[in-house]
Amino acid sequence: MLVIVYVNKNDCFFRNEYCEIEIDGKPILYYCLKALEDSFFDEIIVVTRESDLEYVSEEIVGKFSFAK
């Protein structure tokens, strides 16, 4: 099991745009999950604020069909 903590730029310690970097139109969290999808971890848990839960579950995990 692997736990990832997701914060948006409003919660970021440094309060800047680096917390929501996009590469080729996809959030950095997408690339983290994509790299881990084929790893030896059998489960990946993304921890986020309740206010970001819908975004993470629908716009990242669901939209890109991550299974773990």
Image (spheres, helix red, strand yellow):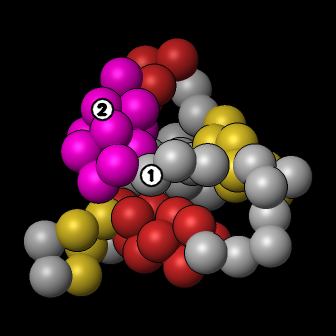
Q: Which residues are magenta?
A: 54-65
Report the disc number at residue 58: 2
Residue 58 point in image, percent of width and height: 30, 32
- Position of 23 with respect to 46 (left or right) is left
Residue 17 part of the magenta-drawn span:
no
Q: Quadrant of residue 51?
A: top left
Q: Quadrant of residue 24?
A: bottom left
- Position of 15 with respect to 59 (left or right) is right
- Mark 1 residue element: loop
Residue 26 point in image, percent of width and height: 22, 68
- Position of 33 with respect to 56 (left or right) is right
Q: Residues within 10 Å of mark 2 (few under 14, many from 20)?
A: few
Q: Earlier in the sequence, mark 1 or mark 2?
A: 2
Residue 53 in the image: above or below residue 17? above
Q: Residue furthest right?
A: 1
Residue 39 point in image, percent of width and height: 70, 76
Task: Specify whether residue 53 is in view.
Answer: yes
Q: Are marks 1 and 2 in contact (CB under 8 Å)?
A: no
Give, as a three-letter code, the residue at label 1: Phe
Magenta segment, principal secondary structure? helix
Residue 43 point in image, percent of width and height: 75, 49
Compute the Cα span from label 1 to label 2.
Answer: 11 Å
Give, as a three-letter code, the residue at label 2: Glu
Q: Which residue occupies 56% across, 26% down?
A: 49
Residue 56 part of the magenta-drawn span:
yes
Q: Which residue occupies 80% across, 73% down?
A: 40
Which residue is identified by label 1? 66
Q: Which residue occupies 39% across, 64% down?
A: 30
Nearer to us of marks 1 and 2 is: 1
